[in-house]
Image (spheres, rainbow, N blue to C red):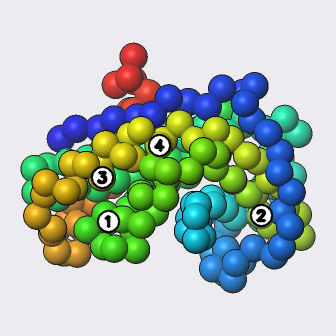
Amino acid sequence: MRADISSVVPESSVGRVRLRRSPPPAVLEAPPHCLVVVPTEQAVQLYVREDEFTLARYPTRCPVELALADFDNGETMCVVLLARLARRNACTFERFLNVADPGELRILKLLSTQRTIDLFLVSDCVRRSFRVKNTLAGLAAGLIATLRRRRSWTPEAFLAWRRRIDTLYPTPEALWRSLRRRRK
């Protein structure tokens, strides 16, 4: 099993962008404390869904850290997109990608080409947004190159591999800490 992590976005590069329109329905329907990945035509947008009380606890100056990890058992690859806000373990979110699925592979392809990533903190009433430099592009491109030399796998094989990873790292915080330790 192999896992890699991208570099963390430094606090100084965190910027704010305005949320110009309502979030997609999938974001508003998502449960609180959830990361929703929305591919647009040319980019991937990240939405963190929170309830009003939790969103109010995020600091005004809220650093955003992103990581992309891959777990490869030689037959199946499981890619995990991680977002960590405010340098708090409790504010760590994950989204597993089955890159054998064309829609999920598209997310990885978009991540490999975009220069910045927009992350939106969303509740029913409050919306905050951040734009960070995309430090995931190189790793995403490398994963795509690896996939070109691989045979595809079944959704069942992916779910079995994901269950194994969930057993090893039952929370997004555990996965984030594990990747940080491996990097040192």
> Where is the N terminus found, in terms of image quarters?
top left
Q: Which mark is residue 98?
A: 1
Q: Does residue 66 appear to the left or right of 55 in the view shown?
A: left
Q: How packed is label 1: few (under 14 Cα within 10 Å), some, or many (20 or more)?
A: many
Q: CA distance from mark 2 to mark 4?
A: 25 Å
Up-down: is 30 above or below 81?
A: below
**Which numbered disc flags the more N-terminal residue, 4 or 3?**
4
SS type, badge 4: helix
Q: CA distance from mark 1 to mark 4?
A: 18 Å
152 on left or right of 177: left
Looking at the picture, how far across and down is residue 85, in whole percent? 67, 42
Q: Quadrant of residue 149?
A: bottom left
- Disc 3 marks which residue? 144
Residue occupying the point 86% across, 57% down: 18
Q: Earlier in the sequence, mark 2 or mark 4?
A: 2
In the image, which disc is placed on residue 137?
4
